[in-house]
Amino acid sequence: MFEKFSLHKGKTESPHHVTKSGRVPEHVAIIMDGNGRWAKKRGLPRIAGHREAMKTIKRITKEADRLGVKVLTLFAFSTENWKRPKAEVEFLMKLPQQFLTTYLTELVEQNVQVQAMGDLSRLPAYTLQAVKSAIERTENNTGLILNFALNYGSHAEIVHAVQNIIQEVSDHHLSLEDVTEQKIAEHMMSPALPDPDLLIRTGGEIRLSNFMLWQLAYTELYFSEEFWPDFNERSLQEAVHVFSARQRRFGGLAEGSEDS
Ligand code: FPP
C-alpha cells in the first residue's frame, strides 16, 4: 500500500514535498469524468457540470505546470460522445471556443503550448477555428504542452495508423520488416509526445474508455472518486505523490531485486 499523503493546508504545497522521490510524471493524461453527476447532485442540468469543468481545466493546467509536468493530455470529447443528446453535443462543441476565449491570454502568459489530437475534421467550423487559432497563437511557446483529445478514440486512431502503414507498404515506401513498434508509434496521433507516465480518471469509474490504448501500455493508472469539477490542486498533488512512490518496471525487475 502507498503511504498516506498528508498535505499541509493550502494549495501551494511545494513540488518537492508532493513527490518525495523527486519523480514527477513528465506526461499526465486525464479522463475528466463526472461532470454530469456533479451537476445532478446539485439539481443542475448536466451542462452546468461541463461549464464548471472548464474552471477545473484551467486550475489543473496551472498546477501541473507548477509541479513540473511537461505534457497534459485531456480527454475532452470522444468518438463515442456523438451518441449523447444533440443539445449536449452542441454544448460540448462550444466549450473549446469558450474555454480558449476566456483563458487563452492567461495560457499564453504561462507559456503553455496548445495541441490537439483526434479527427478534427468532424468538428463544427467554429470549434475547429478556435482550436486552430489557439494552436497557432501558442506554437512558439516552450512551456507545458496542453494537448486536447477532441473527437478522439483509440480504436479509430489504430485503424487510421494501420491504413496509413498499409498504404506506405503498398507504395513501396516501407517494407514489412520496417513495421516495428517504433513505426506504429510514429503513426499514432501524438508521435512527438512521450507516452503518458500517469493516467488519471476522475468520477469513480475504473475503465479506459478507448483512450490512448497504445500509449498507455506501461502507464501508471490512478482512479479518483472525485467528480472532475471537484478535482483540485490538492487532488492532483495527491495523484502525483502516489505516482512518485510507485516502482515502474516496464516488464523488468525492480531495482536491486536481481538474484545474486
Ligand atoms: C465526462 O463527464 C466529461 C465529458 C464527456 C466532457 C468533458 C469535456 C470538457 C470539459 C470539454 C472541455 C474542452 C475544452 C477544449 C476546453 P460526463 O458528462 O460523462 O459525466 P457523468 O459520467 O457524470 O455523466
Image (spheres, helix red, strand yellow):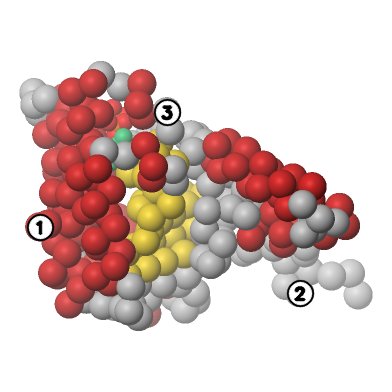
Q: Residues within 10 Å of mark 3 (few under 14, many from 20)?
A: few
Q: Quadrant of ligand 1?
A: top left
The image quadrant that residue 102 belongs to is: bottom left
x and y, in percent, of residue 191 in the image: 56, 62
Label 1: which residue?
Answer: 102
- In this rendering, position of residue 51 left or right of residue 1: left
Q: Quadrant of residue 174?
A: bottom right
The reply to whether the C-beta atoms of the residues labelled 2 and 1 are less than 8 Å apart is: no
Dot 3: what SS?
Answer: loop
Residue at 55% across, 37% down: 156
The residues tagged by marks 2 and 1 sit, at their Cα atoms, a distance apart of: 50 Å
* Disc assigned to residue 256: 2
The answer to whether 7 is drawn above or below residue 56 in the figure is below
Mark 2 element type: loop
- The residue that appears at 44% across and 43% down in the rendered structure is 119
- Label number found at residue 35: none
Q: Give the residue at x 27% y 54%.
A: 131
Residue type, mark 3 in image: Glu
**Disc assigned to residue 80:** 3
Q: Nearer the viewer, mark 2 or mark 1?
A: 1
Mark pair 1, 3: CA separation: 27 Å
Q: Residue furthest front?
A: 171
Q: Amino acid at mark 1?
A: Thr
